[in-house]
Image (tube, rainbow, N blue to C red):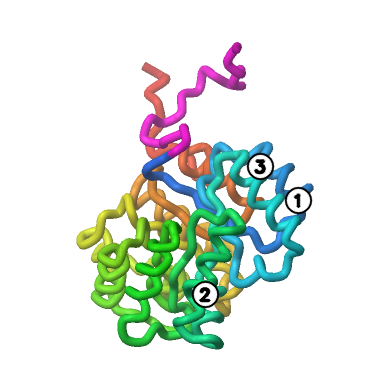
């Protein structure tokens, strides 16, 4: 089979960016707030090579008819994009039905074809050993676990974020997501917290979230600046979460240096 031609092939792309899936780093997690199948198919035809994970946000997976949900899950898998359920759905189940409801919830997720689940405490505190118990139970049910640390409404110290992340890993989580609201202060990246995370965790197993309109006062430029900071600070293969479908292509361009921020030096063409 003849390889597909690439336009402008004379312009090399940075070797620091992993372009072939499955990737071990440089993961892009896309948010699915309820994409209709037609739109999902259209987006994936273009952006699937740049998307690794798709989050069914909050409890939206509860609202579909089952056949429709199954088709959405299958479409992601067809494009080698791994679907998972966002943590706030589990938080809702935990808050309203208790920890005993977690196992049936995980079993249902597995039955439907989800491969992973997020365990978070964005809005509902996980008391005692609940975080460890939830993660271990999900693993026992055959699911990968994306642990999430941090809050959408309160500032968490770097030491607490690191301790929570290590707890997630010890309990069996495959990766840990860091809540984006913790990583931006007054519109600027929280450099102190990010440095401590880098110094104390395996960054290849950490996915940094972007913020969005769910965080009061968020501007689109704040989202972009935080994304740009992640890439400049950690390199093109940093793991980034909460990318909207319409922003995946631009995010890939940013990773390769082809977005609105150009190269850091100019070729000495005059010589």
> In this view of the protein, can residue 259 be seen by the observer?
no
How much space separates mark 2 and mark 1, taking CA atoms? 24 Å
In front of the other: label 2 or label 1? 2
Label 3 residue SS: helix
Q: Residues within 10 Å of mark 1 (few under 14, many from 20)?
A: some
Mark 3 surroundings within 10 Å by alpha-carbon count, few (fewer than 14), some (14 through 19), many (20 or more): many
Element under label 1? helix
The first of marks 3 and 1 along the sequence is 1
Q: Position of residue 31 (x, y in %)?
A: 59, 59
> Disc 3 vs disc 1: which is toward the camera?
1
Percent x, y of residue 56: 60, 62
- Label 2 SS: helix
Please state which of residues 14 and 70 is positioned toward the viewer in this rendering: 70
Do the numbered discs 3 and 1 sit on residues whose CB atoms are within 8 Å? no
Tell me residue 204's x, y (percent): 32, 50
Q: Which residue is mark 1?
A: 37
Left or right: residue 231 versus residue 254 is left
Q: Which residue is at a point 51% across and 46% down the rendered structure image?
A: 52
Count of numbered tags? 3
Residue beneath the point at 40% across and 26% down:
267
For the record, the magenta segment spans 1-22
The circle on residue 254 is: none
Look at the picture and state if 165 lies above or below 228.
below
Q: How far is disc 2 from disc 3 in space, using C-alphas?
A: 27 Å
Name the main secondary structure of what is drawn in magenta: loop
Is any atom of residue 145 visible in this view?
Answer: yes
Q: Position of residue 7 (x, y in %)?
A: 61, 21
Residue 3 part of the magenta segment: yes
Q: Pointer 3: what residue?
A: 44
Eye-nearest disc, 2 or 3: 2
Q: Closer to the camera, 196 or 22?
A: 22
Q: Which residue is mark 2?
A: 90
């Amino acid at each position: 089979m003849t390889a597909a031609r690439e336009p402008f092939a004379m312009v090399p792309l940075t070797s620091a960016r992993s372009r072939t899936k499955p990737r071990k780093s440089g993961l892009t997690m896309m948010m699915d707030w309820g994409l209709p199948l037609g739109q999902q198919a259209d987006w994936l035809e273009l952006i699937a090579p740049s998307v690794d994970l798709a989050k069914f946000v909050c409890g939206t997976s509860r609202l579909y008819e089952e056949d429709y949900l199954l088709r959405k899950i299958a479409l992601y898998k067809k494009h080698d994009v791994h679907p998972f359920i966002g943590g706030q759905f589990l938080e809702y189940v935990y808050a309203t039905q208790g920890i005993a409801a977690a196992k049936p919830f995980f079993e249902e997720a597995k039955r439907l074809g989800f491969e992973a689940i997020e365990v978070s405490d964005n809005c509902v505190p996980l008391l005692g050993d609940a975080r460890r118990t939830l993660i271990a139970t999900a693993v026992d049910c055959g699911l990968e676990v994306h642990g999430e640390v941090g809050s959408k409404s309160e500032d968490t110290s770097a030491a607490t974020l690191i301790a929570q992340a290590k707890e997630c890993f010890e309990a069996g989580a495959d990766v840990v997501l860091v809540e984006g609201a913790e990583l931006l202060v007054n519109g600027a990246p929280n450099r102190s917290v990010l440095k401590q995370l880098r110094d104390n965790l395996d960054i290849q197993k950490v996915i940094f979230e972007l913020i969005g309109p769910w965080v009061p006062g968020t501007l689109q430029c704040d989202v972009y600046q935080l994304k740009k900071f992640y890439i400049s600070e950690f390199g093109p293969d940093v793991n980034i979460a909460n990318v909207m479908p319409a922003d995946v292509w631009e995010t890939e361009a940013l990773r390769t240096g082809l977005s609105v921020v150009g190269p850091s030096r100019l070729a000495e063409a005059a010589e």
